[in-house]
Amino acid sequence: MNTHGSAPRPRRPRARRRSSLAPVALAGGLVAGGLLSVAAAPNPGGPQGEGFQYGRTVGVRLQNSSIVVSGSGVGAKSDGYRVKRPCWYEPGKSAEDMLKSQQDVRAWWFHVNPGKTEEDYQKSIKQFEDKVGEQGRWWTPAYNAADPNGMSCWTGLQGAVWVPQGQTPPAGITMQELMDIARAALTVPEPTIKLSPDAKSYVNLPTWVWLEGVGATTRSVTATLPGVMSATVTATLGSIKIDPGTKDDTRAEVRTNCGTTGHPYVKGSTDFQCGVKYLRSSADLQPPVYHLTVTTVWPVTGQGNNLGGGAVAPFVYDPNYAPVQASATRDVPVGEVQSVVQP
């Protein structure tokens, strides 16, 4: 027999979920449609849910979730990383708290179930009464609304699942998935390219390349399931790559000793280590410029921590994520150096 109790599977016409369960009361009011969505522990504050990125392009947008996402790596343009599973269960209320939340919205239950009797109501909450005194939590579903499959995945989950203490239900969120959520929210700034010469370069003249305004070279995001566990991913600027705008080696030579941000030009310097030397004019190109692209490369590491709410032990987790990369492009017109021959 399965040790995980589950609330009756709700009817799901189209993409909308309906449930015979009463809604759970939250700090912000009742959850529309009767969806059970509860917090595992007091909220530590900070941005969460749909608003954690404040309207910018995101790789994850949490819905009906108590996960809090924060950090210096939140808020720029997403690199498109997707959370592998777009829905999951999260640990929520204890048996006693869940029962109380259902009793608190008794009037609402009768409002959305016209014609039902007191006996019907008592039957609907019996599943919660039966768990009082047991050690465990009701787990409830959440999903990534940024994923086009998020809602359909979510509607396939039960409205609530009872899970004994120390266990995780099928589809229950794991440390790796929490870390994937943090990774999907991780962003780095787009580079600002500086060149010397700036407006136009010339054949065989070194074009120095460096970046400006990168700011902090370490960016991190932490996804926290309050009272249960947290996962942090950190991106550290490791290098830059230069694409001169041509694959033809007879047109350009690239110097790649750039460090993390390139080397600004210093007047009179001949130590050219980072940039491009164009060997042919851009006059024959359409348009007559080279599209120079600089990409910053940020290797990513991860770490997870137990917050006292589950069986996950503190550990360092190396997920082998591919580096985060951000690119910018500049148009570089390259001319020939004109010489005058004296008679």
Image: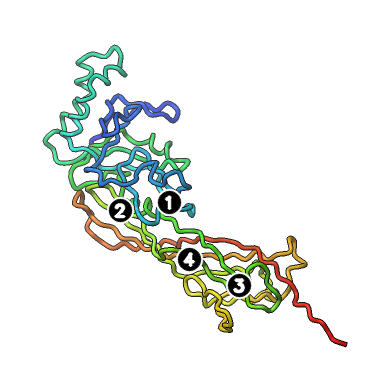
Q: CA distance from mark 2 to mark 3?
A: 47 Å
Dot in front, 4 or 1: 1
Mark 1 nearby-residue class (10 Å; few <14, some 14–19, many ≥20): many
Disc 3: which residue: 196
Q: Is residue 59 above or below residue 125?
A: below
Q: Nearer the viewer, residue 197 or 148?
A: 197
Q: Earlier in the sequence, mark 1 or mark 3?
A: 1
Name the amino acid, label 2.
Answer: Met
Residue 105 spot, x, y in % from top left: 23, 24
Name the amino acid, label 3.
Answer: Ser
Name the amino acid, label 1.
Answer: Gly
Dot in front, 2 or 4: 4
Disc 1: which residue: 75
Quadrant occupied by the C terminus: bottom right
Quadrant occupied by the N terminus: top left
Q: Is residue 53 left or right of residue 279?
A: left
Determine if residue 191 is in view: yes
Q: Earlier in the sequence, mark 4 or mark 1?
A: 1
Residue 81 spot, x, y in % from top left: 46, 53
The kind of secondary structure element at disc 4 is: strand
Disc 2: which residue: 175
Which residue is found at the position 31% from the left and 55% from the top?
Answer: 231
Q: CA distance from mark 2 to mark 4?
A: 26 Å
Residue 245 spot, x, y in % from top left: 65, 66
Mark 3 nearby-residue class (10 Å; few <14, some 14–19, many ≥20): some
